[in-house]
Image (cartoon, grey):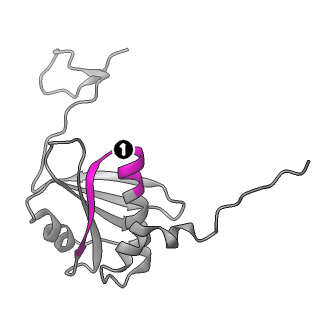
Amino acid sequence: MEEQHRSAPSNWITQHPVYQDLLNLGVDDSVQVYGAFLVYLDLTEVRRWTAVVPVPCPELQAVLLEGREREGEELQVVYPLPAHRSVSHGDLRCIVGRGSPMLLCAVASDSTLVYQRLSDGLVTPEPPVDIKDLGRRPHRKRRLQT
């Protein structure tokens, strides 16, 4: 008995309806559109975001993604950016100025995605979980507790 192997078409991405929608947004940068599609898949299929929709950004000639991390939470904007591209302060200001929380997602050529949360101004981060202030001298740096 011979086994039949079913292979997916090599161009399944180009046939995907969401990819087709991204292409129809009028963004000429095919690398950025492809990156936006990869981020869309990650947000919807892996991270389970809801109401993720692509939005064209004519000022940057880019596709942004808007969605909610959980149902009922605030709308967030994700800027998929190919890792080999540079981004200017003005580009980020254009997106942060929309008023929604923003994530910059660097898309590597091997499809690795790295998310960075951006804000309008400086935000003091929470200390890592494994670091505790030993309280000896308040001006000293925190030490790792072993």
- Say which of 2 and 114 sits in front: 2
In the rendered image, which quarter contains the C terminus?
Answer: top left
- Left or right: 140 with respect to 120? right
Q: Which stretch is magenta?
A: 41-56
In the image, residue 145 sits, relative to residue 96, either above or below, namely: above
In the image, residue 2 sits, relative to residue 38, either above or below, namely: above
Residue 69 x, y percent position in the rendering: 25, 45
Quarter holding residue 58: bottom left
Q: Residue at x 33, y 52 (%)?
A: 115
The residue at the far right in this view is 1
Residue 36 x, y percent position in the rendering: 37, 66
In the image, residue 63 sits, relative to residue 75, either above or below, namely: below
Q: Residue at x 64, y 67 (%)?
A: 9
Q: Residue at x 29, y 72 (%)?
A: 63
Instruction: Characterize the local packing of mark 1: few (<14), some (14-19) or many (20 or more) Cα atoms within 10 angstroms.
Output: few
Q: Circle 1 is placed at which residue position?
A: 47
Residue 102 x, y percent position in the rendering: 20, 56
SS state under label 1: loop
User: Mark 1 is on which residue type?
Assistant: Arg
Q: Is 90 within the magenta? A: no
